[in-house]
Amino acid sequence: MNATTLLQQVPVLLRGETAQVTLWTETPSPARVATWLAVTVGGSSAFGAAMGWWRAPEQALFTAVKLPLVLLATGLGNALLNAMLAPLLGVNIGLRQSLLAVLMSFTIAGAILGGVAPLLAFVIWNAPPLAHSTSAGTTHAFILITIVAAIAFAGIAANLRLLRLLERLGGSAVVARRVLVAWLSVNLFLGSQVAWILRPFVGTPGLAVQFLRDEPFKGSFYEAVFYSLRRLFLD
Amino acid sequence: MTNLPPIPPEPPFSGLPTTPVPIAAAVPSPPLPGVPGTDPAERVPIGGFFAASEAILRQPRRVWFQLTQDGQVRLTFLLLGIALACALAYGLVVGTFSGGNQLWAAPLKIAGGLILSGLICLPSLYIFACLSGAHTRLAEVCGLVAGLLALTTVLLIGFAPVAWVFSQSTESLAAMGVLHLAFAAIAIRFGMKFLARGFEQLNAQFGGGLRVWTTIFVLVLLQMTAALRPILGTSEDLLPKEKKFFLSHWTESLGLTDSGASRR
């Protein structure tokens, strides 16, 4: 298979042609896995570069490296757990197939993020620089919402395709939903913390542009949410 | 999409017809239903610049069919060439309002902004099409976007004489801005129709996704008017130093007009 043939698999994933995708997850090939990885990394990297560009060109480079890392670290970190949960909840697939199913959903998300990256870059190009905090209030909120909306859209589309695949693999919609919810829960749990460790992605005007914050492993995403909620409601 | 029935062979010439041909037969028949390419005329490759301009206005089915054939890359570039040339020509008319540097800056900004908008929005259109289950290739989507830009700008050329007359008559920046926006809105509407029907003809219908994309594309085009300002009026700088949302740019431009500002 040449590179063009392999890349032609991406539209098949996006269209959610589960019969073909099931076959691919049952008979994996190194070239196909490499292509899916390349699309995941390439797409999320382009989106990350657009995100970070608002703060500084250096931040664009950092976020372009870190965003794919979040996806890959989450997928690999939960690979074993996902493979255990699937048969327990009714979809009898092994480690390799569950990892490929998750990678398939990441590939879809990566392709979508890569597709909307030029749009985000255009929005950033038209926004006042993040460093000018006086004029950036409303724009900051707008850009953050744009980023969240794009990531949410990519995530939802990818998981809908994953659900179809799980339905085919498990033979039941109820079982597929159960497995998807379990996988999503553990992926969100780990993914949030990985993203917390690898912060910043957009950057903050008052703080220096860094690849990682000075103490990346200090605290956790959940502690930060907890303290934020406490400040909001109790202080 | 390319699995079409073969063209029936022409009957051999056998002198004068034995039965008289009714007058109605000489009248061009309406477009045939079905997939593009069922009419033999649609299978004739589109040759040059003017043929492509005419085809996009009068034979869109021929363009859609040719975009699925082997020479699609050439046709796509031809359509892009039409879009570029027509946008430059319309930009010159826009530039006549202020004159001076705008005579070359406005054409470059309009042509550049249009092509850039198409490039920015192209990947998301292809992704939306695939997510909606459309079996369409990237090359076909590129061709349809090129067609959208070509048809839009060809229609703008039709409006150019009217725009020129007004630009020589009025001093009001706001009035000219509204006029150009109205012309652009009409032209883009036809361009979008070409795109949507093109997807239908390629058996790639995606109503909801296409509507979302259309909104995004129009917003990108509108923002280009602020990102590349001034396109109509004048300024000391060729490109703006301050970033602005297009609505605030337009509001400020209207305010300037109220305070008596004109093209000069």
Image (cartoon, helix red, strand yellow):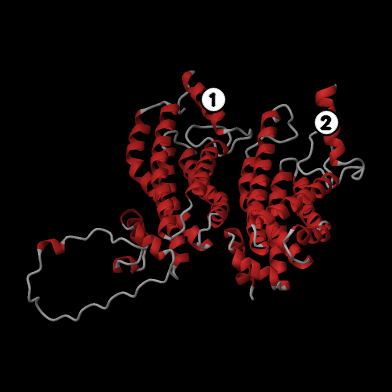
Q: Which of B178 and B145 is in front in this view?
A: B145
The residue type indicated by label 2 comes to Ser
Q: What distance separates the C-alpha of mark 2 from that of mark 1?
A: 39 Å
- Chain designation of label 2: A
Compared with residue B102, is residue A104 higher up or lower down, i.e. above or below? below
Q: Which of B238 and A40 is in front in this view?
A: A40
- Please give the count of numbered marks on the rendered protein: 2
Choose mark 2 or mark 1, whichever is in front: 2
Which dot marks residue B252?
1
Identify residue for label 2: A228
Decide if residue B53 is on the left or right side of residue A163: left
Residue B264 % position (x, y): 47, 27
Determine the secondary structure under disc 2. Answer: helix
Q: Quadrant of the N terminus of chain B?
A: bottom left
Mark 1 nearby-residue class (10 Å; few <14, some 14–19, many ≥20): few
Residue B56 % position (x, y): 36, 56
Determine the secondary structure under disc 1. Answer: helix
Decide if residue A183 is on the left or right side of residue B65: right
Mark 2 nearby-residue class (10 Å; few <14, some 14–19, many ≥20): few
Write the residue at 47% across / 54% down: B145
